[in-house]
Amino acid sequence: MAYPAPLTTLEVVDAQAPSQEAGVASMASGDAFKGICIFLIVFGHNKSLEYASPEFRAFLYLFHVAMFLYLPFLRPWETWGRTKPADLVVRYGWPCVVFTVIYTLMFVKFSGRALTEVPVLAGEAVLAMSARAFDHATGLQLLWFLPALIGIRFAMMIVAPLRGIQVWAVLVVALIAHCLIGLLPDSLKYITPFGWPVAALVLFPGLVIALLDLGERRVPVWAICSLAALALALTFSTGLINRGHPLNVGMIFVPSIATPQKLFALDVIQLSAFVILLAVSRWPPIQIVFGGLGRMSFEVFVLHQPIYIAIRSVVPAAAAANLGPWVTGALTLAMTMLLAMGLAFIIRSLPPVNKFLFPGGVGTFGRLWRPHVQQ
């Protein structure tokens, strides 16, 4: 059986689709899934909406970023080891470097510091690859996601050749790591090459998703309702929602074996959210509403926070106070989404810029430097 070439960033692959129509449907649902998740992420990063309902923001932080981290595990097991490591490093690592430099430059400039600090701050962030390091250099945490995704894909490559009892042994090891990673000391949380703590946290539930083949299962409505009820019950009964210090995967602020009931509850909530959002993303109306956003999810992810900050900087404080947090939040959220998608569209319409900022792999740079000239 022939498998397709590695797909572009954050895409769902369904190489086992029995027909072309089924493959198209799977891609449509994958785009809708990503669209819903990136919308929730942008929502969660909106300060006005956070002030309006900090509990809801804390609830979103339980699962919204994790959905993207689990997405690679929908790939067929046979394809896990087919992507070249160098392509992965370029595909996710190069945008991380470029946007770290850009955002560090902006952060230093607007904070009134010397531009000579940029190389040191950006270099430290790129080497440490942690949310804390990116926050220190750029004022933003979001770029931690890219090295973490490389680490997850590397872990999948290591697991790919395993079969039978070997898989179960890895599952046990992954479970142990999953239970212990929340106990890491702060010093290890700051230096995280290729996001290894995030990869260690995510591997076990990701393997569960893969082994249960959740991407292909059709979950009945009654089961979806039951999962939603269970997730909500665990959310409130275990005290996972902390408005002052919400769960943060990037900062490795997560439950561990020290609080087993919270760790179990978080796993159930995230897996339930994953199954529910996959089911919802199969509905044609949802695909129409969120599909386009999902196809630009990578660009929107790396662009949206500076855009939001710029919008907030030009919104008069008095106007925001008069409108209230909900209206201000709704307006700034809509403007952030529109501007981020508009900028993403412009970047995509300029192939050299798009390939430079978001390369598909090592070969992209070769085609960029040696463009094809039509005779």
Image (tube, rainbow, N blue to C red):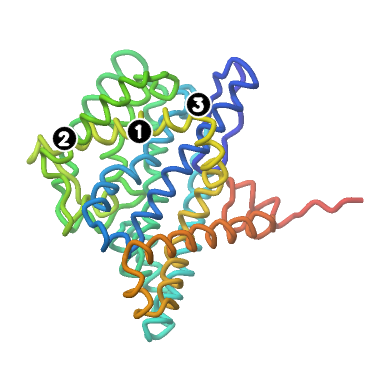
Say left or right for 91 vs 160.
Answer: right
Q: Callout 2: 10 Å neighbours few (<14), some, many (20+)? A: some
Residue type beneath disc 1: Phe
Query: What residue would you read off at disc 3?
Result: 79
Q: Do the residues labelled 3 and 1 touch (CB within 8 Å)?
A: no
Instruction: Tell me if label 2 and label 3 are in contact, CB under 8 Å.
Output: no
Between 198 and 319, which is closer to the camera in this rendering?
319
What residue sits 63% from the left and 21% below the top?
21
In primary-sequence order, the first of circles 2 and 1 is 2
Front position among marks 2 and 3: 2
Can you tell which quarter of the image residue 226 is in? top left
| Whole-percent x, y for residue 309 in the image | 41, 70
Q: For mark 2, what is the residue?
A: 234
Q: Which residue: 32% across, 68% down?
A: 324
Query: The residue under label 3 is which amino acid type?
Result: Thr
Q: How far apart are marks 2 and 3 (CA)?
A: 35 Å
Q: In this view, does 354 lie to the left or right of 38?
A: right
For the residues marked 2 and 1, what is the alpha-carbon distance in whole angstroms?
16 Å
* Residue position marked by numbered label 1 in the rendering: 274
Q: Where 298 sits versus 170, above or below?
A: below
Q: Distance between the residues labelled 3 and 1?
A: 21 Å
Q: What element carries label 2?
A: helix
Q: Badge 3 local density, few (<14 within 10 Å), some, or many (20+)?
A: some
Name the residue furthest front.
Answer: 322
Query: Sequence-wise, which precedes: disc 2 or disc 3?
Result: 3
Which of the pair 111/168 is nearer the observer? Answer: 111
